[in-house]
Amino acid sequence: MTDADMTDARPDDATPFPPGTRVAVRLPLPLADAYDYRVPADLTLTAGDFVRVPLGPRRMVGVVWGPGTGDVPDAKMKEVVGRLDAPPMTAEAMAFVDWVADYTLNSPGAVLRMALSVPEALEPPKALTGYRPADPLPNLKMTPARDRVLAAAGDGPPRQAAELARLAGVTPGVVTGLAKVGGLVACDLPTFPPPTPPDLDRPGPDLSAEQAAAADSLSAAVHDGFSVQVLEGVPGSGKTEVYLQAVAEAINQGRQVLVLLPEIALSAQWLERFQARFGSQPALWHSEVTQAQRRETWRHVALGQADVVVGARSALFLPFRDLGLIIIDEEHDGSFKQEEGVVYNARDMAVVRARLGRIPVVLVSATPSLETQANVDRGRYTHLHLPARHGGADLPDIELVNMTKTPPQRGQWLSPPLREAVTATIERGEQALLFLNRRGYAPLTLCRTCGHRLQCPQCTAWLVEHRLLQRLQCHHCGYQMAPPPACPECGTEDSLVPCGPGVERLEEEVRALYPDARIAMATSDNLYNQRTAREFVHRIEAHEVDLIIGTQIVAKGYHFPLLTLVGVIDADLGLSGGDLRAAERTYQLLYQVAGRAGRADRPGRVLIQTFMPEHPVMAAIQQGDRAAFLAAEAKGREEAHMPPYGRLVGVIVSGTDEAAVDAGARALGRAAPKGADIQVLGPAPAPLAMIRGRHRRRLLLKAGRGTAVQPLVRAWIKRASIPKKVRVLIDVDPYSFM
């Protein structure tokens, strides 16, 4: 984003709309405009109220967005049906919806749908029945069972009959019978109680001088309005403990806090760290949370009953009553970019949300993105640096293994130096991690007779063999099939062979090399929720595992004191292709996974297998010279006028009819904008030319950093004659070029 993109817009306080006046109601539909409705005689509404309105034969929930436009004749004006019993949308939240829609070139209704992702939360919650002791207690015939029930009921908040019966050691009939005679009073309980408030009196960990200085800076920012602070620290430097000090300060001021994590469903250690610091758990918001939990969390956030929310990118659109601080942990992570529907980067939109609310935002990473670094260099963001590991632990020694000089044995993937290092590590009673960022057994299956490659029928992608599941799977659309007994092209039986390594194939090799070692796999296939992640973490911490084999999941934030060796199997994997950020992403990933080694009092060692030891990424990793790498990367981008020194907008044309897609792409190409600092590349088939049965063509608009690209693209799309059966997706500031 440029300086011109960051406005300080903030809507005026809501004014009442009395009966008979017109109001504009925004609906959670992909619509650009709000619809006018009349306020009924028994209501007075304000902007932000959630209302139920008629739309054709249906009734829908929408938000009062302001006064009506007056375009609808009085005779055709429909009335608002009613107002919902829910806290109104705040002015900042409404401004945020409009801002995101304008920036991403989506309709405000489509963005509002993300803010109303749980419409049932707007309805009164279905209460459960709980019981508390009557006061005063009537004159009853008491029994030992009844005494135990009253004792249990008087100890803590009201409880359901089944829970009281369990605590008292009686049947539920004793509880309900006591209620019938007046000994217990029935009351409503929420389906899910609000999160327990954090205990701010619990002592935090002892901080080093550098940590304390950074924590003081972040805590002071809570009182100073809008700011962006970048907390950079080497792996193991205690970044989490530092920013938790600012979290505590915001809560102490009566404000709410949002923490965004890239893999919240897998962040078991982070949640345990929060529990240890505050004696409670935060509210959670991610894909693994049940719909009932999402409903209650949405209401708790809206009512101000959730002090801290930890979530994935969509948590940015929750209805915070009084948001006071936003933390983006691992801000460089690509998971913060949503690639479908409303395409946005949660990191960038968090900065906007903070500015609209005049609150601080903290971007945390061991390897901040080049975009963030550029904003630091321009003086827009404040930089805080933790250069040393907490507790005096040293950074690991990093060695490059030249695979052209010391290759593995034929059909294997571990080089002799790495094999020897793993053996020595296990013999010392320590743990090793072998990192390969490729799920499954093999990325490609081909016929050794005719050379046919098994491809997804719905995508331009090879099918990945998952031997443990006995399936071939597409990692783009999810298509699965059983491995065929013969080649589908030439019919030769038993001719299909795997090509290249995946973590399952690596595990097969490792089990043969180290038959006595205790081995654990860590991928999104087996660590798919908090429970499985927690079990995995506890096994590692209890030293029930000697050797970990994992994908990028293990590169994010895990702390294992006995893990002293990291081996990277195919470090060159991310450097191929035409991705603008390939070098930067590879550096970040290798640096992060290397940082898992030697985080306690034992020295760490990292072996990186590469066929390109002379590559700038490999040299920077080995020498620990991140500054030089960033400087070289920035220079190359700036010379090419690429982000963050230029603007890009991706335009993806897709549809099931290939001819119509091509026609739409050509129409966009003919209508492309022109200018001194504007260039449109394409149309051309996207690298993934088909996904989920939809053909894809891509155009890329390139412009100067100070160019307002949104008006250009709006006019461009409007000029082009695009077939109705074709979908056009616009990606402002693209991260993926697939």
Image (cartoon, rainbow, N blue to C red):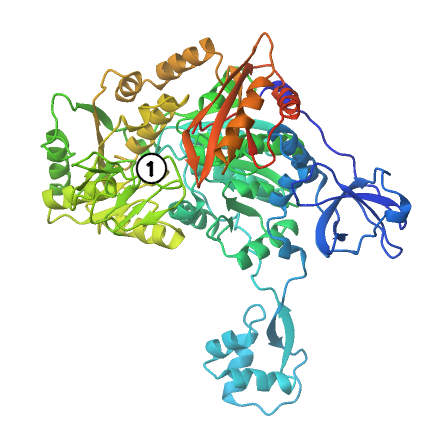
Q: Which residue, given by chain and number where applicable, does mark 1 sit on?
A: 552
Q: Quadrant for the C terminus, please.
A: top left
Element under label 1? helix
Amino acid type of the residue tagged 1 in the rendering: Gln
For the point 40% across and 52% down, the residue is 530
Question: Can you give x and y, in whole percent of width and height, for residue 486 in the image?
Answer: 20, 46
Answer whether residue 732 is visible to the viewer in this image: no
Q: Nearer the viewer, residue 647 or 341?
A: 341
Indicate left or right for 51 with 170 as reference. Answer: right
Q: Nearer the viewer, residue 522 or 140?
A: 522
The count of marks equals 1
Q: Quadrant of residue 196?
A: bottom right
Residue farthest to the bottom, as pictured? 141
Q: Nearer the viewer, residue 550 or 736?
A: 736
For the point 71% across and 42% down, the residue is 90
Question: Can you give x and y, in whole percent of width and height, for residue 442 in the image?
Answer: 24, 39
- Rendered view: 559 above or below 417: below
Question: Can you give x and y, in whole percent of width and height, for residue 332 in the image?
Answer: 44, 29
Q: Local crowd at mark 1 within 10 Å, few (<14), some, or many (≥20)?
A: some
- Rendered view: 313 above or below 1: below
Q: Quadrant for the N terminus, please.
A: top right
- Rendered view: 712 above or below 193: above
For the point 29% across and 41% down, the residue is 464
Indicate left or right for 135 with 735 as reference. Answer: right
Indicate left or right for 649 with 630 as reference. Answer: right
For the point 38% across and 55% down, the residue is 531
- Rendered view: 399 above or below 321: above
Question: Can you give x and y, in whole percent of width and height, for residue 581 in the image?
Answer: 41, 23
Q: Quadrant of residue 191?
A: bottom right
